[in-house]
Amino acid sequence: MSLHSPSASCGGCACCGLAPPPPPPRRGGNVVLLAKTGTPDPRLPGTIHTAVSELTELGGHALPVVGDVRNDDDIARTVDLAVDRFGGIDIVINNASVLDLSPTEDLTLKRFDLMQQVNVRGTFALTRACLPYLRKSADPHVMTLSPPLNLSQQWLGAHPGYMLAKYGMTLAALGIAAEYRNTNLSCNCLWPQTTIATAAVGNLLGGRESLHHSRSPEIMADAAIELLSRPAGTDNGRTFLDVEVLAEAGVSDFAKYGGEQPLTVDIFVDGPDLAHQM
């Protein structure tokens, strides 16, 4: 797969920075971004428009849709724009996500509902809307940025509200993968082994000091490119860590992605000794 393909991408300016959505434009492809950040947010630098500018500078074509993944009409606009402008949809990237690590008694139901609506329903709704066009594609991929289903007591109990939202994204992806297992659709999940040096991590997961012990967003971009470059049907229904995808591609030295020791293992990932990966 050359990645010279139409794609609809959900999210883009928050979760893992700008790195996950760019794979297609980096190789001359076409992207439609759906995101709420049409105006700057002091907590998270950049907007959908700056994201589009950066993607265009990479050599591709990117179009913004300022909207809300909770709104079915906004999803329809995104899909219609991709089909009308680029002729179809080959790739869907589910990147929209709300993060709230509050314990159960402190988590308001309003925030709980927001995480379910954006993370779980958004993933399901965007993928569902794109499926008629993915079924027409010769090389269809769905990539959801969500973790492996780690059922350890640590991660089940650390923040159940957020756990339900992120595992719900993974289950949605795995369910669709199973439903379409007899087609050529590749529907998989990708998650970072370590925290990623983004504004979201700095603001919500430990402050500026945490950024020093995080890898750069490029590791997720490179893993996404590798995963989306595999012929459709090669992998389906799998939950990958970024380092696993890259290791399968022959990468063994992750020092170029930075991060001071000790690297901070990401949420939902068990903590191996990462020193040997530097």
Image (cartoon, grey):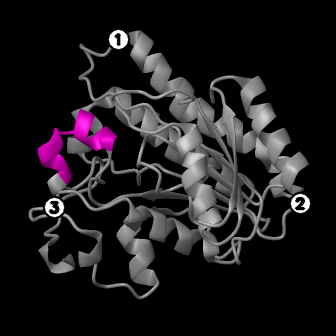
Q: Earlier in the sequence, mark 2 or mark 3?
A: 2
Looking at the image, residue 245 sits to the left or right of residue 232; the answer is left
Residue 100, percent from left and from top: 33, 27
The N terminus is located in which quarter? Answer: bottom right
Which quadrant of the rendered structure holds the C terminus?
bottom left
Q: Residue at x 42, y 33 (%)?
A: 164
Residue 182 in which image quadrant: bottom right
Q: Magenta segment, principal secondary structure?
A: helix
Q: Nearer the viewer, residue 66 or 192?
A: 66
Q: Closest to the observer: 46 or 250? A: 46
Return the disc, 1 or 3, that comes first in the chain's sequence: 1
Q: CA distance from mark 2 to mark 3?
A: 42 Å
Magenta residues span 199-211
| Residue 263: mark | 3
Residue 123 seen in render: yes
Front: mark 1 or 3: 3
Callout 3 secondary element: loop
Secondary structure, mark 2, is loop
Element type at mark 1: loop
Q: Earlier in the sequence, mark 1 or mark 2?
A: 1
Q: Amino acid at mark 3?
A: Leu
State the residue at coordinates (48%, 17%): 113
User: In terms of depth relative to the viewer, which is nearer, 135 or 213?
Assistant: 213
| Residue 239, position as x, y percentages in the image | 48, 60
Q: Residue at label 2? A: 136
Residue 241 visible from this viewpoint? no
According to the picture, the residue beneath numbered tag 1 turns out to be: 108
Query: Which residue is at a point 80% across and 65% down the rendered structure image?
Result: 183
